[in-house]
Image (tube, grey):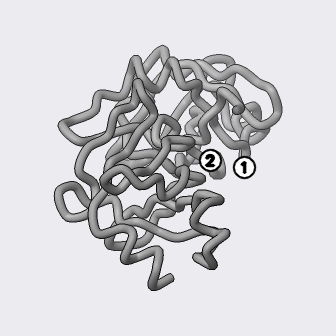
Amino acid sequence: MNNNIFVAKLGKAVGLQGQLRLFIDSDFPEQFKKGAIFSTNRNLQLKVLEYNPSRELIKFENYEDVETAKKLTNQELYSTFEQTKEFCKLGKNEFFWFDLISCDVYENELKLGKVKEIQRYPLNDYLEVTTDVALTDKGLPKTFLIPHLFDKYILNIDIEKKVINVTKSFEILENS
């Protein structure tokens, strides 16, 4: 698995001081603080000089005028798993998506499958699960979605063991 996580995209330069519009694709805007380092899809390393969250503007070291900043327009910013874990603090029953991917999903003792991806929809996030072969051999769908709602569908998550225990999800699989 690639160690980079897409966190934002840079828009056009704004003003004359090298600030760029920042389009965040992360639940953790606090990671864009002064001194933070990101890599880009063009293999550049960018160090944050300043970030203005209210105006969604960012400025990087060595890109402090409008002409040099324009060179960064439309580039994607990436963080690493390690940086993300260091700078982004989680609350109770919150997990990084990259930790949930590849977890085995169980309802009671029945293995339903493995988390393939997280799908984000307006009201909820969903675990996209690749159904276990033993269940697909019985004619059940190859993939299905489980709402990422604690207590209603998700009972507990053990990141160390890569196991997610669920309830009412076999019904979702059967009806998918």
Q: In percent of the image, x 53 and y 43: which residue is there?
A: 101
Residue in the picture at 51% in, 18% down? 82
Q: Quadrant of the N terminus?
A: top right
Q: Amino acid at mark 2?
A: Lys
- The answer for how far apart the CA atoms under marks 2 and 1 are is 6 Å
Q: Secondary structure at mark 1?
A: loop
Residue on which disc 2 sits: 9
**Left or right relative to 30: residue 175:** right
Q: Residue at x 77, y 37 (%)?
A: 41
Q: Which residue is mark 1?
A: 74
**Residue at the spot x=43%, y=19% of the render?**
34
How packed is label 1: few (under 14 Cα within 10 Å), some, or many (20 or more)? some
Q: Earlier in the sequence, mark 2 or mark 1?
A: 2
Q: Position of residue 125 (x, y in %)?
A: 39, 62
Q: Residues within 10 Å of mark 2 (few under 14, many from 20)?
A: many
Q: Secondary structure at mark 2?
A: strand
The spot of residue 136 in percent (x, y) is 63, 69
Asked whether 12 or 83 is in front, the reply is 83
Q: Is residue 42 above or below residue 70?
A: above
Location of residue 161 (image quadrant):
top left
Q: Position of residue 12 (x, y in %)?
A: 65, 51
Name the quadrant containing residue 78: top right
The answer to whether the residues at label 2 and label 1 have Cβ atoms under 8 Å apart is yes
Image position of 106 (left or right of 44): left
Query: Image quarter for residue 51?
Result: top left
Q: Position of residue 11 (x, y in %)?
A: 63, 51
Up/down of 35 relative to 67, above or below: above
Residue type, numbered disc 1: Asn
Q: Which mark is residue 28?
A: none
Q: Is residue 4 left or right of residue 42?
A: left
